[in-house]
Amino acid sequence: MDLEEVEGKRVLAAAGIAVPAGELCADPAAAAAAVERLGPSAIKAQVPAGKRGKAGGVRLVVNAAEARLAAQAILGMEIGGHRVERVLVEQRADIAEELYCAVLNDVATRGPLILFSAAGGMDIEEVAAKTPQALVRIPVDIAHGPDPERIRNGVGDHALADMLARLYDIYVRSDAELVEINPLVRLKGGGLLALDCKLTVDDAALYRQPELARRGAPEKQTELERRGREHGLKFIELPGNIGVLANGAGLTMTTMDVIEHHGGKPANFLEIGGEAYTKATAALALVLANPGVKSLIVNFCGAFARTDVMAEGVVRAWEELKPTLPVFFSVHGTGEEEAIKLIRGRLGLEPHDKMEDAVRAAVEAAR
């Protein structure tokens, strides 16, 4: 779950990290009035998307008249698939230097990673590619937390080291996947100021973060994804043409990987393990509602869950919806003999012995 900049900065401020004075506004008149109080300001679109400045969603103004025009231009824009409905009017800072810092989940070290660079204000991917030596990486042992001396040696500044320790504390307390300040600026008069903030919270931890969950930005969803949520299904629409039904997120992603390995493109992520098999009709209807889907792979692997129970749900859904596109089954594990008999007897289809064979057949059929 992403938070908009204004909400992320509220988290920063509560942790003792300085942020500019600002006001959240929903109309041009309010933006103009805010600039009268704040003086020269930045008018910033509030959407959970990057590159807002490049999209025209960040504008510098010096007076109320300019603020009104800037807010009129920004409000209603589409940035990263999100409609701008609010702007943050923020007092401009006297900047001496722009820096970058973040704490994030790192796949390579399987733990938290503190990132710092003197090249703030730029895309960090660009910095890493062009000047990797400019990026300081400090892996953290999550059991013991960050080493203050290592951070000080990495950034060469006590004030920066203290700020990074606060940022790490936010990362832990917020169950964050990423907390980023870009740019973090050093002011000409001294001190550090966070001019932007990106905060992404782990969806699986939202039950522990009710306040952040209430403040999270609305998730960008397609119509089918909204329908999936209404049915309690985690459905993600993808640009491929091969529908996927599998039990368990891991098996679903594996199936998608195998589809791509054989030259196909999955049309969705949708797992119907656990209690979701009871929603097989809604799940199948979601997949079939995508007109680009040309074939379907159903992949069940049962350990504790019984594949015959899951197959019963899909077969019943198939009989009810009566689709005409080709479908290919792969069934293994607890209850597989009963499941295979069920599929043969009621659908007249022969499940494949190997998942890879079923996937290959689905890829060929989609062509």
Image (cartoon, rainbow, N blue to C red):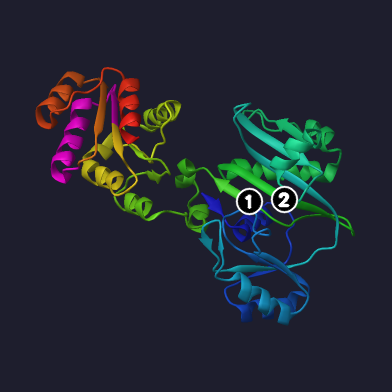
Does 342 sit above or below residue 296? above
Tell me where residue 336 appears, x and y as whole percent. 21, 20
Task: Mark 2 or mark 1: name the one nearer the start of the chain.
Answer: 2
Does the magenta run of residues contain 18? no
Q: Residue furthest front?
A: 367
Does the magenta run of residues contain 308? yes
* Label 2 with label 1: CB-CB less than 8 Å: yes
Q: Which mark is residue 198?
A: 1
Q: Quadrant of residue 295?
A: top left
**Residue lying at 37% horizontally and 32% vertically, measured from the top left:** 252
Mark 2 neighbour class, 10 Å CA radius: few under 14, some 14 to 19, many 20 or more: many
**Residue lying at 82% horizontally and 38% vertically, measured from the top left:** 155
**Residue lying at 67% horizontally and 79% vertically, measured from the top left:** 68
Give the residue type at disc 2. Answer: Asn
Q: Which mark is residue 182?
A: 2
Does 323 sit above or below residue 5? above
| Position of residue 365 in the picture relative to residue 179 (left or right) | left
Mark 1 neighbour class, 10 Å CA radius: few under 14, some 14 to 19, many 20 or more: many
In magenta, the rendered stretch is: 298-323
Tell me where residue 100 appears, x and y as whole percent. 75, 46
Q: Nearer the viewer, residue 35 or 235?
A: 235
Q: Nearer the viewer, residue 314 or 304?
A: 314
